[in-house]
Image (cartoon, rainbow, N blue to C red):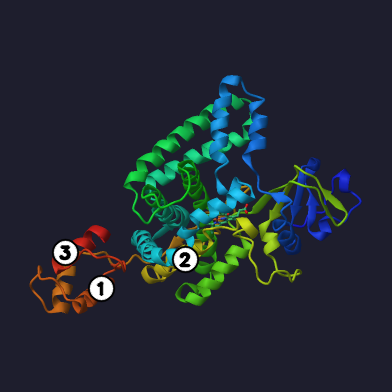
């Protein structure tokens, strides 16, 4: 973003934009574009996150009384979301969910991330490539997010759509028919609850819903429910965007896909220059005087992340990256997100080492909040497809064993991995099932044939 120098009449005399602070039109608030101001303001308790109550109370004044209970119900749900909750409650909620995102928890998830990455990339490679965002980035974000939360891919997608519909209620006061938006939001909330309740009992113990079901999250049910749904919102466009932006850099730099260090550096560069979430929004709670300006209660402060990330003229906070937020509300999923990216690009290197952009310029989405490619066509050589007879022959020869039903030793298992790989089949590290040649061939054909 350019550092805008347009001024509204209130601040016309002040050099606000030059200091990284620019007024929004109509006295609505301020945009922040410098590292120094971003760190200062995001750590200032006189600024708070946007809580639902004021907006929803205003909305209620535009609605008939019969819709007030629906507004209260939606408000009660939204108020429990950690990113929309004031300091003290926020700490409690954040602590209760922190265990899912610790270094150990992410390490424990890594084999699953790897298997999911390999599965999705394998399909992509077999098709000779395709559109990376819809065939790789989003399906992988969905799959990994769904596993963390403990829902199926389909339930995750449904929850994402429904929670978007619910979030629209916050803008209902500006719509022609706010009552209709509230009715639709309330219907979405009912379906969200049904989906979560149905998924909860079937969820694996390592997932958020599974831990909740086992009584391992020390919070009221309503808190867990609202924040589990928030995790769906938090993990789709952000992760999809990060993967798309990083793919443009890695696949567009000759040799980078094969070099783990370069991949890591380009992931950082992408996060810094194209943060998937463009802004951090706060609201002024108590007056703040800043370089001759007054930030008034109720005004919005919008930090432009890409600008705050730039290290050219502001030696502030080392190499700190604002793409995952800053301060008390910094992204809980940051470590997990980076691991997701690492595993995906490592899998792409193993399975489709010649993956490259298809030559067209990638098209970017135009969105007020998100920054990512709209489309990114990638080509790669399709790996040889698994053929049952050829695989059986290759395995019996390599293992010098004609008995297809004898359980293999651990050494033979290692040889099997290598033979399968030569036939374009990558075995996920945590796969435990097949023990005999026949079972391996059956697995390879059903997983990859
Ligand atoms: C590249 C991927 C991601 C990006 C760029 C990203 C970005 C962000 C940002 C900027 C914030 C702070 C918002 C604010 O202060 O207003 C945030 C908060 C949060 N993110 Fe992420 N996020 C990513 C992935 C994830 C994932 C995968 C999860 C979990 C599955 C997650 C969970 C959260 C949560 C729970 C918060 C709220 C933290 C709090 O309120 O204390 N994020 N994220």
Q: Determine whether the beta carbon of the residue marked 3 sits less than 8 angstroms from the nearest atom of ligand 1.
A: no
In the image, residue 26 lies at what x, y percent?
Answer: 80, 40
Task: Identify the residue position indicated by label 2 in the image.
Answer: 339
Query: Could you tell me which secondary element the residue under label 1 belongs to?
Result: helix
Image quarter of residue 135: bottom left
Which of these two is toward me, 276 or 223? 223
Instruction: Classify residue 83 as left or right of residue 162.
Output: right
Q: How far apart are marks 1 and 2 (CA)?
A: 24 Å
Residue beneath label 3, please?
A: 439
Vertical arrangement, residue 50 with respect to residue 411, above or below? above
**Alpha-carbon neighbours of circle 3 within 10 Å: few (<14), some, or many (≥20)?**
some
Query: In the image, is 151 to the left or to the right of 388?
Result: right
Q: Is residue 357 visible in this depiction of the protein?
A: no
Q: What element carries label 2?
A: helix
Identified at 63% across, 65% down, the residue is: 321
Q: Are marks 1 and 2 in contact (CB under 8 Å)?
A: no
Which numbered disc flags the more N-terminal residue, 3 or 1?
Answer: 1
On whether ligand 1 comes within 8 Å of the CB at mark 2, the answer is no
Mark found first going from the N terminus, 3 or 2: 2
Camera-nearest residue between 127 and 53: 53
Judged left or right of residue 447, residue 279 is right
Q: Which residue ends up furthest to the right in the rendered image?
A: 13
C-alpha distance separating marks 3 and 1:
13 Å
Q: Residue at x 48, y 41 (%)?
A: 222
Tell me the quadrant of the picture where the C terminus can be found.
bottom left
Tell me where residue 190 appears, x and y as whole percent. Answer: 45, 33
Judging by the rendered image, the residue that carries numbered circle 1 is 417
User: Regarding mark 3 in the picture, which secondary structure is present there?
Assistant: helix
**Of marks 1 and 2, the one in the foreground:** 2
Please state which of the two labelled residues, at mark 3 or mark 2, is closer to the viewer: 2
Sequence order check, earlier mark of 1 and 2: 2
């Amino acid at each position: 973003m350019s550092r805008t120098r347009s001024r509204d009449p209130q601040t016309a005399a002040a050099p606000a934009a030059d200091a990284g602070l620019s007024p929004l039109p109509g006295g609505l608030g301020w945009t922040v574009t410098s590292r120094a101001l971003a760190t200062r303001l995001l750590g200032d308790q006189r600024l708070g996150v946007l809580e639902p109550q004021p907006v929803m109370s205003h909305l209620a004044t535009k609605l008939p009384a019969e819709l007030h209970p629906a507004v209260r119900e939606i408000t009660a749900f939204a108020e429990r979301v950690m990113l929309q909750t004031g300091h003290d409650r926020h700490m409690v909620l954040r602590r209760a969910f922190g265990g899912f995102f610790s270094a150990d928890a992410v390490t424990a998830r890594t084999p699953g991330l790897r298997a999911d990455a390999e599965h999705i990339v394998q399909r992509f490679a077999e098709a000779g490539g395709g559109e990376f965002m819809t065939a790789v980035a989003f399906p992988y974000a969905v799959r990994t997010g769904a596993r963390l939360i403990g829902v199926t891919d389909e339930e995750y997608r449904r929850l994402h759509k429904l929670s978007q519909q619910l979030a629209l209620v916050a803008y209902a006061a500006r719509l022609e028919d706010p009552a209709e938006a509230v009715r639709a939001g309330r219907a979405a909330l009912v379906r969200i609850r049904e989906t979560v309740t149905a998924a909860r009992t079937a969820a694996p113990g390592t997932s958020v819903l599974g831990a909740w079901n086992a009584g391992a999250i020390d919070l009221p049910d309503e808190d867990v429910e609202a924040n589990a749904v928030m995790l769906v919102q938090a993990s789709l466009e952000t992760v999809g965007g990060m993967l798309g932006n990083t793919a443009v850099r890695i696949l567009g730099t000759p040799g980078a896909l094969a070099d783990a260090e370069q991949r890591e550096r380009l992931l950082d560069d992408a996060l810094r220059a194209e943060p998937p979430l463009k802004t951090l929004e706060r609201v002024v709670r108590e007056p703040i005087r800043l370089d001759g300006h007054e930030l008034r209660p109720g005004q919005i402060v919008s930090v432009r992340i890409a600008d705050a990330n730039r290290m050219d003229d502001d030696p502030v906070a080392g190499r700190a990256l604002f793409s995952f937020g800053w301060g008390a509300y910094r992204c809980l999923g940051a470590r997990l997100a980076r691991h997701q990216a690492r595993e995906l690009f490592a899998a792409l290197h193993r399975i489709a080492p010649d993956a490259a952009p298809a030559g067209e310029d990638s098209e970017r989405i135009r969105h007020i909040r998100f920054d990512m490619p709209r489309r990114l066509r990638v080509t790669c050589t399709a790996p040889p497809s698994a053929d049952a007879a050829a695989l059986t022959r290759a395995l019996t020869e390599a293992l010098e064993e004609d008995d297809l039903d004898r359980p293999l030793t651990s050494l033979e298992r290692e040889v099997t991995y290598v033979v399968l790989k030569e036939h374009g089949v990558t075995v996920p590290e945590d796969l435990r099932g097949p023990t005999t040649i026949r079972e391996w061939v059956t697995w390879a054909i059903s997983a990859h044939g």
